[in-house]
Amino acid sequence: MLYLHGLGHFHPENVITNRFLNELDIGSSEEWILERVGIRSRRTSLPLDYIKTTKNRDPRAAFEASLCANAQAGARAAHLALKRAGIKPEDLGLIISGSSAPDHVAPAEAATVAAEIGIDIPCFDLNSACSTFGMQLNFLNNMKPETLPPYILVVNPESLTHVVDYSDRRVAPLFGDGSSAAVVSASVPSKMVFEAFFCDSKPSSWDMVRIPRLGYFGQSGSAVQGFAIRKTTESLRKLQETYPINSGRFKFVGHQANFGMLKTVCERCNMSEENHWHNVVDYGNTGCSSAPCVLSQNWDRFRPGDHIALVIAGAGLTWAHTMLKIQGTVIGD
């Protein structure tokens, strides 16, 4: 089990609307996009003029054009998580980062985030594409508490718009940029606890989702969608069986791949809309930061007795789940 002390998120200011994508003249109308993926808008660290002028024809140029590096975005999310946790940067003893599209192959992105925050502590990357956050938590849960520092920062900066071909109407509507951060501990108690950890992978299908070095995102769309629906449904049902509680106390946060995928999972698992927390409609798929960003955006909605099922899937192919329990006295339940 891992104690959660604080969550943070950050999304860049520039908004890619469906109208903007329609104006790129790539055969994707506003109605087509909304019907296909259920996304209205997404954020980007790239200047909109850069996308409009170049359609990101050379993804290497996106790094230079970016208005916000992953280190800066990760630090923004981290500062919010630290504030909510009530601790200072110097209280951290370890930083673990992960990103589907890191700014640097070396050093570890965790090092650049630590430098941006202004601390010198051990740091490394643990990357499993969109399921990274779940894998990071699983890894820490498997460590002996006495081997870990009191407070650990898990940070996931994503700039997926940097690896999007904006002349490809199949991919252009899907992705946005975002960063998440979580302050966790294996030894310092909190009323918020991660438990029921699980992770798995199917590496024989690794090539179904990929981002080659200096290249664009690509996937076997329908097959990946089917995989995400199946594994998310299986994981959510398992958590529902493990925690047979008042339905109003059971919440679901999935990987924000697209709204259609999430809606199908909710229908199969009898999850009501009010208990399904999501942000994909307004922020798009922000990779491994997507589900923890949803958690962070709903921070003020956490109530004693809530059980928040976090279920994520990603390239590799990988999937993971955990349960976040909000402990405390529950009145009238």
Image (tube, rainbow, N blue to C red):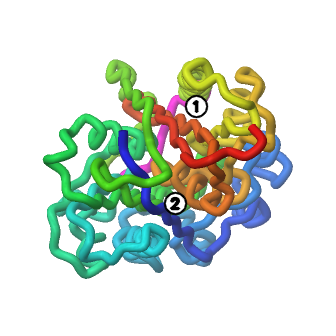
Q: Seen in the image, is 99 located left or right of residue 274?
A: left
**Quarter of the image with the C terminus in it:** top right
| Residue nearest the observer in this picture, 70 or 57 | 70
Disc marking residue 230: none
**Quarter of the image with the N terminus in it:** top left
Residue at image position (16%, 74%) is 120
Where, by quadrant of the figure, is residue 247 drawn? top right
Q: Which residues are magenta?
A: 214-223
Q: CB of mark 1 within 8 Å of CB of mark 2?
A: no
In the displayed image of the protein, which residue is found farthest to the right? 31
Circle 1 is placed at which residue position?
A: 221
> Dot 1, how many residues are within 10 Å of its Cα: few (below 14), some (14-19), or many (20+)?
few
The question of residue 27 being in magenta is answered with no
Where, by quadrant of the figure, is residue 274 drawn? top right
Real-space Cα distance between discs 1 and 2? 18 Å
Circle 2 is placed at which residue position?
A: 161
Q: Seen in the image, is 189 located left or right of residue 108?
A: right
Residue at image position (43%, 67%) is 85
Whole-percent x, y for residue 88 in the image = 33, 77
- Which secondary structure, mark 2? helix
